[in-house]
Image (spheres, rainbow, N blue to C red):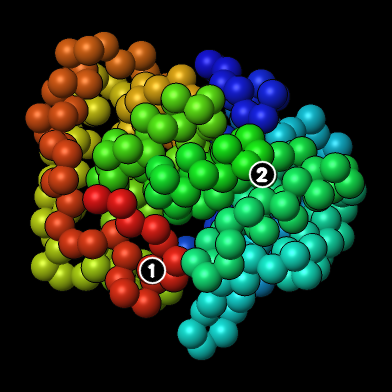
Amino acid sequence: MQQRMIGGRSVAALGYGAMSFGGMYGATDEATSLACLDAMLEAGITHVDVANIYGLGLCETILGTWIASRKPDIVLATKAGIVNGTPRRADNSDAYLRAELEGSLKRLGVERVDLFYIHRREQDRPLDEVIGTLQRLEQEGKIGGYGFSEIAPETLRQAHAIHPCTAVQNEYSLWTRAPELGLLQECARLGVALVAFSPLARGMLGNRALDHAQVQDGFRGRNPRFTEPNFARNTARIDAFRAFCAARGWSTPATALAWVIGAGDHVIPIPGTRRAERLHEWLPLPDLSAADRAEIERVLPVGFAAGARYGEHQTLSVESYC
């Protein structure tokens, strides 16, 4: 597998997002989750991403159990900055970030994480104050580097000027291409990794089309792209992409991931799944030619997705820039 750099460490170009263990996309159990992590490691994936709020700590706990028993050589990332409640809010204070990081380290069973993200930026808190906290956590050996999730290019420029940023995490896939309007380019210019979450469109870019009943509960059920008539329109467009992949003998998710990886040498997609058999569908990654990418653009042109990627209730501190 191709290699990429993140915070001075070499990792596989394909990472892993460990959100599904918390039940966000359906019920699972610890044994199934551990087997999925084993399959991930066997596939050569070496960058694992999680967050304190995924399953309200459950995802970190499962990952910690796996780390303790397998002792893997991985680059480990977690996130903090979102306070659960009604409504949710962002808190980037020194006290909150420190307390949440300590909780994450305990659940993960480690003394340090390689990468610590601000999950959502608290807009009213000065950026230099937040970066100061992150710098001190680096100096204390608690984190290897810092990142932000869902920020604008201008925020990245400001943060990086205060203290070098390791990575920015943003949704990026064939159906969410907003990073191409500046964030993708700014990360490349500054030497910052762009970690692409939901590169398989929250399950839409799988080998099999989702049934609408599958997405009615939980996060996807309140997402405009998964509500009708948007869901049917999006499914029809993606069915054409599935046909394109099948005609070439390629897995649909593997092709979608290869497309994201091909967007730049600094891009690292982190698909997630709770089952090993789904993870096996991600590989091997096809070697896309310029002609292949052009045909994919014809089948799924930029902006094809019907509906916004988030509902209004899901946009907590997501920075817009276009």
Closer to us: 193 or 153: 153
Q: Left of 58 or right of it: where is 308?
A: left
Q: Quadrant where the N terminus lies?
A: top right
Crowd tier of the residue under label 1, counting other residues whose Cα lies within 10 Å: few below 14, some 14–19, many 20 or above: few
What label does residue 315 carry, if any? 1
Under mark 2, the amino acid is Tyr
Distance, label 1 to label 2, CA atoms, is 22 Å
**Residue visible at 16% across and 21% down?**
294
Reply above or below: 195 against 127.
Answer: above
Q: Nearer the viewer, mark 1 or mark 2?
A: 2
Q: Is residue 181 left or right of residue 304?
A: right
Report which residue position mark 2 lands on.
146
- What residue type is disc 1 on? Thr
Identify which residue is drawn at 57% across, 18% down: 3
Is 289 situated above or below 28?
above
Q: Which mark is residue 287?
A: none
Which is more toward the observer, 96 or 80?
A: 96
Local packing at callout 2 (Cα closer than 10 Å; few below 14, some 14-19, many 20+) is many
Earlier in the chain: of badge 1 and badge 2, it is: 2
What's the residue at 71%, 35% (across, down)?
Answer: 75
Identify the residue at horizontal 75%, vertical 65% (top origin): 94
